[in-house]
Image (tube, grey):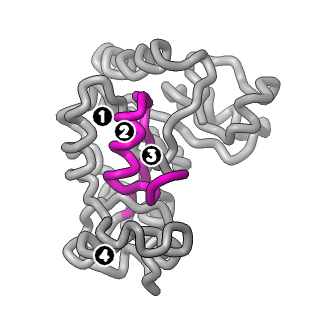
Amino acid sequence: MGQAYTKASVVLRMLSEHFPPTGLIAHRGLAASLPENTLPALEAALTNGTRIVEFDIQLSADGVPVVVHDESLLRTCGVQGRVGDFTADELLRMCCGYADKFGARFDHVTIASHDTTVDVLGAYPDSCLLAEIKDESVARFGLRACMEPVLSALEPIRERAALISFQAAAVAFAQARGFAVGWCIESHDARAEAMAHRLQPDLLLTDEAALMAREALWAGDWRWAS
């Protein structure tokens, strides 16, 4: 428990240094200007002064974590099918330039692996990474199959990383390994509040409207963020 607190405290200190008690995070990188969850978008957020970036992880058919938000590849890649239907080799060659939003401007940008993303972003010494494992992959491949490779990649920068998820079981899994963790909540009802107190995550993540409203924020030994 002492080791887990030490690891988590680094993430919390970075939040304290760069944000107020309720703070905003670069969600999927600089996604307004660049294709979300890509290395250009994530690096742009860091080079433009953000210190805490969030990205999403799905598992390929052969069990490799890749940085993609949707289970479907249609919105970002224009490809029919789900992430888990393709091998990592196929996915890492796939353009994810979000053509509906950016046209052909980013046709050269491809899906990145979780390992590569951690290597690139971890080279920014003041960066803090929030890696979100997506529910669809956990449901399809199982908790351990998803969590083991994700946490393994985060290990070299674990003092500057946190595993976040809507899945309470994923949060508890990473917490047991001594990682800082964040639970993403879908509602602000009594059941969710009780779960938050059971989990005792380092971060609670909610939508920006709830974060700004403040009256929806429960008191506890965690930080709120969006």
Q: Can you identify the residue that label 1 sits on?
A: 177
Instruction: Based on the picture, tell me whether residue 11 belongs to the magenta stretch.
Output: no
**Callout 3 amino acid:** Gly
Q: Is residue 158 visible?
A: yes
Q: Residue at x 27, y 44 (%)?
A: 151
Sequence-first disc among 3 and 4:
3
Q: Please state which of residues 27 and 140 is positioned toward the viewer in this rendering.
A: 27
How far apart marks 3 and 1 lie (CA) works out to 26 Å
Q: Amino acid at mark 2?
A: Ala
The residue at 43%/53% (across/down) is: 56
Distance in Å between CA atoms under marks 1 and 4: 33 Å
Q: Earlier in the sequence, mark 2 or mark 4?
A: 4
- Gap in Å between the C-alphas at discs 2 and 4? 30 Å
- Comparing 59 with 199, the one in front is 59
Q: Which span of residues is magenta-colored?
A: 32-58
Label 3 element class: loop
Residue bearing the label numbered 3: 29
Q: Nearer the viewer, residue 82 or 41?
A: 41
